Amino acid sequence: MTDFHEEATIVSRSGPGMNRGDAEALRINRITEKTIGCAIEVHRTLGPGLLESAYEECTCFELSHADLRFRRQVDLPVFYKGIKLDCGYRMDLVVEELVIVEFKTVESLLPVHDAQLLSYLKLSGISVGLLINFHVPVLKDGIKRIVNRF
């Protein structure tokens, strides 16, 4: 697992040596950077103390202005022995079909929150997710980037 602080520095690679995997990783990094920037703008404006739904709505407003495509409250079925089952999983946001975002407004992120996002990553086939906890004085302290390499 990687937290936001380790992700803060991103080295850009380009040129003839860059393969499709590098290009996709670079695209995912840009999407996570923009998404985090949008969330920081919301937190700077609203501060902590509101419900998740308010932060989600405002972050979506910012994502739209950043020209990022997203889907909200995305149902996530479980496929078991070839049967699609609705187990009640719902992802808060999927940005550009490449990054899952889960919003929290809790005292501190717990292992259960990591497990929730890891489950979503595994079931969706998406490899990168962001846990964003708005119940902190400085938002960068409430952001966790999780990568599931399957």
Image: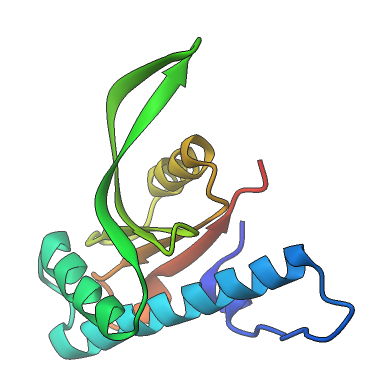
- Residue 10's x, y, as percent? 66, 83
Place residue 20 in its image quadrant.
bottom right
Q: Residue furthest right?
A: 17
- The reply to whether residue 13 is in sight is yes
Number of dots carrying numbers: 0
- Residue 138 in view in this figure: no
- Please state the horizontal and vertical placement of residue 105, each as a whole percent of the image: 22, 62
Residue 74: give x, y in percent of width and height: 28, 46
- Residue name at image x 43 percent, y 42 percent: 120
Q: Quadrant of the N terminus?
A: bottom right
Locate residue 98 relative to residue 109 in the image: left or right.
Answer: right
Residue sitting nearer the eye, 129 or 86: 86
83 versus 147 height, above or below: above
Q: Residue at x 35, y 68 (%)?
A: 69
Question: In x, y percent, where is residue 138?
Answer: 33, 84
Quadrant containing the C terminus is top right
47 with respect to 7 (left or right): left
> Relative to residue 2, is residue 150 depicted above or below?
above
